Image: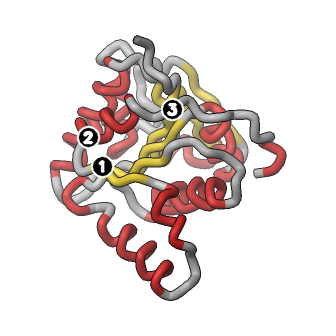
């Protein structure tokens, strides 16, 4: 039975993080997506967790589509072996829009402020009804817990409705994440990008 999702965007750090579990998870995720026949869409870098997830997917025979802003080419250094496809775009906003357009779902792996920015923006777009694509947060070494607590605090304080909890799912590890993806329905992709 074919996988319902053809492509998934992974938001993750350009650093490795202090715990080796983050890099291990990035490699396992890249490998797992490739083995399920799901194209990896990501930020195009070859450093940190970005490089780990991309290189693992490529090594497992997967398709990898990178999108990188021109001003980050020297800092995030795309993988030297090349990707299945690579786009160089003029801005961070265009990068996020292209990742949205090319993906049937989203995974937030461990990362810093950039990863948080991407996760919050894609959840905001879902809350506004601009898409209904699945969004997962991987809780490697407790990385997602502060974010979950923040969402709960905003619900408690009345800034986010109870439905905010249903905008995303949390996976404890990579196997759980891949299993959630395997059962996610193919989303309606008819939302025009011009509304983003």
Marks 3 and 2 sit apart, C-alpha to C-alpha, by 16 Å
Give the quarter of the image for residue 34.
Answer: top left
- The residue under the point 81% across, 50% down is 195
Residue 129 in the figure: left or right of residue 174? right
Give the quarter of the image for residue 112.
Answer: bottom left
Q: Are marks 2 and 1 in contact (CB under 8 Å)?
A: yes
**Observer-nearest of 98 and 68:** 98
Residue 142 in the figure: left or right of residue 79? left
Which residue appears farthest toward the right when viewing the image?
A: 194
Give the quarter of the image for residue 174.
Answer: top left
Residue 79 can be seen in this image:
yes
Marks 3 and 1 sit apart, C-alpha to C-alpha, by 17 Å
- The residue under the point 38% across, 29% down is 182
As displayed, is residue 146 above or below residue 10?
below
Residue 47: % across, % down: 37, 42
Residue 151: % across, % down: 45, 73
Where residue 185 is drawn, which disc sits there?
3
Q: Do the residues labelled 3 and 1 touch (CB within 8 Å)?
A: no
- The residue under the point 62% across, 61% down is 124
Q: Name the residue under label 2.
A: 176
Secondary structure under tag 3 reads: loop
Q: Mark 1 points at which residue?
A: 171
Marks 2 and 1 sit apart, C-alpha to C-alpha, by 6 Å
**Observer-nearest of 45 and 62:** 62
Mark 3 vs 1, N-terminal side: 1
């Amino acid at each position: 039975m074919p996988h319902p999702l053809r492509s998934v965007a992974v938001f993750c750090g350009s650093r490795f993080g202090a715990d080796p579990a983050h890099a291990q998870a990035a490699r396992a995720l890249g490998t797992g997506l490739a083995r399920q026949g799901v194209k990896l869409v990501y930020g195009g870098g070859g450093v940190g967790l970005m490089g780990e997830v991309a290189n693992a997917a490529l090594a497992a025979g997967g398709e990898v589509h990178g999108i990188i802003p021109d001003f980050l080419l020297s800092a995030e250094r795309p993988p030297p072996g090349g990707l299945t496809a690579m786009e160089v775009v003029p801005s961070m906003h265009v990068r996020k829009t292209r990742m949205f357009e090319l993906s049937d779902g989203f995974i937030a792996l461990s990362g810093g402020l950039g990863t948080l920015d991407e996760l919050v923006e894609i959840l905001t777009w879902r809350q506004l009804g601009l898409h209904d694509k699945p969004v997962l947060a991987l809780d490697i070494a407790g990385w997602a817990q502060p974010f979950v607590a923040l969402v709960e605090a905003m619900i408690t304080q009345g800034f986010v409705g109870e439905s905010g909890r249903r905008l995303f799912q949390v996976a404890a590890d990579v196997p759980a994440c891949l299993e959630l993806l395997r059962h996610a329905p193919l989303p309606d992709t008819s939302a025009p990008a011009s509304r983003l």
